[in-house]
Image: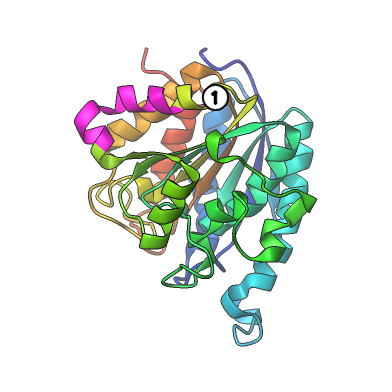
Amino acid sequence: MPVPPRDIHVIGVPLDLGQSLRGVDIGPGAVRYAGLGPALRALGHTVTDLGDIEIPKRDQLNPDQDPAFAKAIAEVSAKLCAQAEASATNGATPIFVGGDHAMSIGSVSGVTAAGRTGILWIDAHGDLNTPDTSPSGNIHGMPLATLLGTGLPDLVQLGGRNPKVLPEDVVLLAIRELDPGERAMALDLGLKVLTMRDIDERGIAKVVREALDHLGHTERLHVSLDLDSLDPSVVPGVGTPVPGGLTYREAQLICETIADSGRMTSLDLVEVNPLIGDHNRTAEVAVRLTESLFGKAIL
Ligand SMILES: [Mn+2]
């Protein structure tokens, strides 16, 4: 087995407050129904499902009193951060199942307390907006900027450390849509951004090895997998689909190569929205990719 047995913690984060579509809050259930736990146990891992982080229902909140649900997201992020830190410092490999990508503010803030952590952000988008640059104001477009130290003060200061990650410890992979403010931040910070064009020109095998090499100096590796990095024809159930994404095999080869490296210490699976997809296909793809990340090989 390429990945030695891990003590995996599954942590559901049914957060739908970082964006405007309904349905992403049932993503954790959809991924469980698609068989995440049994699939990982079949590979020899120990899997403990810690249940869901408690999230206020959108219908209980008043956006006039809490614009962009920023306060609610900060409270959720603090709870998630504490759980993530506990799992990571106990030697477990946590899988955070979302939920929208705003949840990664909490998950990454927690796991980075366990040691210097490389962040592999696999996404159609940069998630590098700030309240000043965001066209939508949605916090799910801001998590990476927040973790790098720019954003809403309550979120940037989460856990009492800022920044959570250093620019040289971040790689963005499979990017195909950046807002002007995001492009400016990526260039200012000198972030390593590997776009769909890089993948088209050089092939996914070379590009994913380059991504891992760039993060070779960090003690830990967190993979933040936004399902919208895949092409919408493969994963219809995402909130912000963009044409021209990863094929199923390109995504799987990314995951197989990460598994071969033996370096991944935590994982986000985000933006699964079963209300948009069909017959839970997006959650099933998420489970197949997670199996590959945890060592499932063809031969
Ligand atoms: Mn994202």
Residue 56 appears in the figure: no
Colouring style: rainbow
Left or right position of 92 against 272: right
In the displayed structure image, the side of residue 248 where residue 136 appears, left or right: right
| 180 with respect to 34 (left or right) | left
Answer whether residue 88 is magenta in the image: no
Q: Could you tell me which quadrant the C terminus lies in?
A: top left
**Which residues are drawn in magenta?**
198-211
Residue 206 belongs to magenta span: yes
User: 90 or 171: nearer the eye?
Assistant: 171
- Taking the spot 55% from the left edge, 40% from the top edge, the residue there is 167
Q: Relative to 150, does residue 44 appear above or below in the rendering?
A: above
Number of on-image labels: 1
Q: Residues within 10 Å of mark 1 (few under 14, many from 20)?
A: few
Check disc 1 and report its element: helix, strand or loop: helix
Q: Which residue is mark 1?
A: 42
Point out residue 200 in the picture as x, y percentages from the top left corner: 21, 34
Residue at 39 percent across and 22 percent down: it is: 209
Residue 216: x and y, percent?
54, 21
Which residue in the rendered view is the most extreme toward the bottom? 64
Q: Amino acid at mark 1?
A: Ala
Q: Is residue 135 visible?
A: yes
Ligand 1 has an atom within 8 Å of the beta carbon of the residue at disc 1: no
Depicted 10 relative to depicted 30: above or below? above
Find residue 166 and report its image quarter. Answer: top right
Residue 194 placement (x, y as % from top left)? 35, 37
- Direction front: furthest residue: 188
Residue nearest the observer in this picture, 63 or 54: 63
Q: Quadrant of residue 91?
A: top right
Rendering coords of residue 48 (x, y %): 70, 36
